[in-house]
Image (cartoon, rainbow, N blue to C red):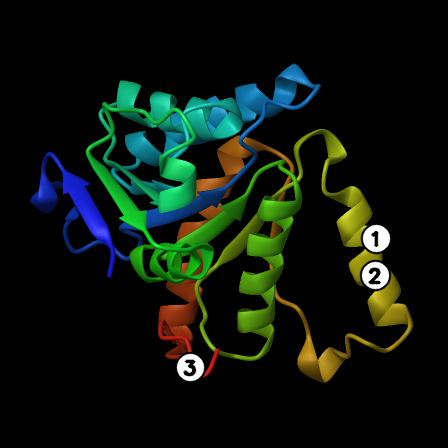
Amino acid sequence: MHEIMSSDPAGADAGARRIKSICVYCGSGAGVEPAYEAAARSLGLAIAEAGIGLVYGGGGSGLMGAIARAALSAGGFVTGIIPDFLHRRDKLLPEIQETIVVPDMHTRKRLMFERADAFVALPGGIGTLEELVEQLTWVQLERHTKPVVIADIDGFWQPLLDLFAHMRERRFIQASFEVRYLVAEKIEDVVPMIETAAARTDLLGVRKETVDPRL
């Protein structure tokens, strides 16, 4: 059971567009490079200006706070999903239109998946990495076809991309069972990449948006 606090429950309906909302995974801290926070702000603006809703982890600090504030400043609809133990501890943004408080991390991740049509990973820590890798696993296992974008700001994700290459070289990732993701080095490329990928999936008639309940 989860709790929903919303100032406009109907506001998340972005119409009959293919991509209605994008889930962004990112750090609750700002990191050491100003480029990370600038990227978060730019992505928040881009998502809102495209008429797409933002789904994120609900926090008000670091990259989380930066992307949410930017989306709000451009008139975007923001949904924050946060577990109860963090809700009691973290400073939230009262101005976001919808805050969903859930009992645990598993429910948070599941609901973020259900509320989003695509996923983007900005720089972040262990939690961001775990959320990204879970989506990549589900895509690899053909549990869904929602686009997953790795926003490689200032080469932040390069060590992970190198690890994926190492896994391919060592035959733990094989061509017949590939890990499918998009890499954006520029924030302005993220939304167009997602929309193009979603259009291609529809054209091929292979869209799948429901994760197997066993996962």
Q: CB under 8 Å between callouts 1 and 2?
A: yes
The residue beneath circle 3 is 212
Q: Position of residue 59 (x, y in %)?
A: 41, 32
Number of numbered discs visible in the structure rendering: 3
Give the secondary structure at mark 2.
helix
Disc number placed over residue 165 in the picture, else none = 2
Q: Does residue 126 appear left or right of residue 65 in this picture?
A: right
The residues bearing labels 3 and 1 have C-alpha atoms spaced at a distance of 29 Å
- What distance separates the C-alpha of mark 3 from that of mark 2? 28 Å
- Structural crowding at the residue carrying mark 2, measured as other residues with C-alpha within 10 Å and reported as few (<14), some (14–19) or many (≥20): some
Kind of residue indicated by mark 3: Asp
- Give the vertical position of 6 relative to 2 (above or below): above
Q: On the image, which quarter does residue 206 sit in?
A: bottom left
- Mark 2 belongs to which amino acid? Ala
Task: Kindly state the secondary structure of the residue where label 3 is placed.
Answer: loop
Residue for point 68% across, 80% down: 177
Q: x, y (%) of residue 55?
A: 35, 44
- The residue wearing badge 1 is 162
